[in-house]
């Protein structure tokens, strides 16, 4: 469920990277929701939630990499559909991949980061975890918070905090412990519970392996 990877050239070859990417006809999730006005069914929401959780679990698992990879910019523009959304009843063919690793980093790098680097922050405010907004030390669980905001988009078909006039107002609300609860009005109970679990304070958030257990 990841899009984009790179390989080093053979020994003795030119010192450059080869970037390989897959063309996905379904475009980004935000375009499908806000431009094409796609209305995903509950089954489609759950399928996308599973695809993203699987991809993020792969990034965060130490068994796959020397250190867990923190995406740091998980949001609907970076979730790409392999094909156009299927009609209701065809959700089994729905596939979503995670893209844009420009802000990604190894967990160890963030743990050793200077206070200045942490204060800079990474990602987009509408999806950003409170510990990043506050300039605190963080770990891979910031991606779980961002994931909850992506799920908010799926169940409400609006951007997170769409009622806030300015981004700085979102930052104030999030750092004060507020969450866009009103946007969960149309979510089925299981998905609503998952979203509320994922947007808790960092120490109370589940890992993506735990998210997958709830979804599957």
Image (cartoon, rainbow, N blue to C red):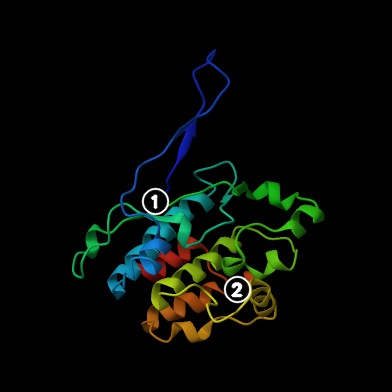
Give the x, y percent position of residue 148: 50, 70
- Residue at (39% x, 51% y) in the render: 1
- Determine which quarter of the picture holds residue 53: bottom left
Give the x, y percent position of residue 110: 70, 51
Q: Crowding near pointer 1: few (<14 within 10 Å), some, many (20+)?
A: some
**Residue 199 placement, left or right of 176:** left
Count of marks overlaid on the render: 2
Q: Farthest left residue?
A: 89
> Could you tell me how far apart the alpha carbons at marks 1 and 2 are, in whole angstroms?
26 Å
Work out whether residue 27 or residue 56 is closer to the camera in this orientation and state it.
27
Q: Which mark is in front, 1 or 2? A: 1
Mark 1 lies on a secondary structure that is loop
Mark 2 lies on a secondary structure that is helix
- Determine which quarter of the picture holds residue 20: top left
Q: Crowding near pointer 2: few (<14 within 10 Å), some, many (20+)?
A: few
Work out whether residue 132 or residue 160 is closer to the camera in this orientation and state it.
160
Q: Farthest right residue?
A: 115
Sequence-first disc among 1 and 2: 1
Kindly identify which numbered label has been placed on residue 1: 1
- Residue at (52% x, 74% y) in the render: 160
- Residue at (62% x, 67% y) in the render: 129
Quadrant of the drawing holding the C terminus: bottom left
The reply to whether the C-beta atoms of the residues labelled 1 and 2 are less than 8 Å apart is no
- Determine which quarter of the picture holds residue 157: bottom left
Kindly identify which numbered label has been placed on residue 207: none
Give the x, y percent position of residue 159: 49, 72
**Residue 22 placement, left or right of 14:** left
- Residue at (39% x, 76% y) in the render: 155
**Is 94 situated above or below 1?**
below
What residue sits right under mark 2 in the picture?
204
**Is 97 situated above or below 29?**
above
Give the x, y percent position of residue 165: 60, 78
């Amino acid at each position: 469920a990841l899009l984009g990877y790179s390989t080093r050239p053979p020994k003795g070859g030119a010192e450059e990277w080869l970037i390989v990417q897959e063309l996905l006809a379904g475009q980004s999730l935000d375009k499908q929701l806000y431009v094409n006005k796609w209305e995903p069914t509950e089954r489609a929401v759950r399928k996308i939630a599973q695809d993203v959780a699987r991809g993020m679990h792969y990034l965060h698992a130490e068994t796959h990499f020397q250190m867990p990879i923190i995406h740091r910019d998980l949001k609907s523009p970076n979730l790409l559909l392999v094909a156009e959304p299927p009609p209701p009843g065809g959700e089994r063919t729905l596939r979503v991949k995670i893209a844009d690793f420009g802000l990604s980093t190894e967990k160890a790098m963030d743990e050793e980061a200077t206070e200045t680097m942490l204060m800079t922050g990474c990602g987009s405010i509408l999806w950003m975890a409170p510990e990043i907004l506050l300039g605190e030390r963080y770990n891979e669980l910031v991606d779980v918070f961002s994931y909850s905001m992506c799920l908010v988009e799926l169940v409400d078909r609006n951007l997170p905090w769409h009622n806030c006039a300015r981004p700085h107002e979102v930052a104030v609300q999030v750092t004060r412990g507020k969450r866009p609860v009103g946007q969960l009005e149309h979510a089925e109970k299981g998905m609503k519970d998952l979203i509320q679990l994922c947007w808790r304070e960092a120490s109370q958030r589940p890992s993506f392996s735990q998210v997958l257990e709830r979804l599957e």
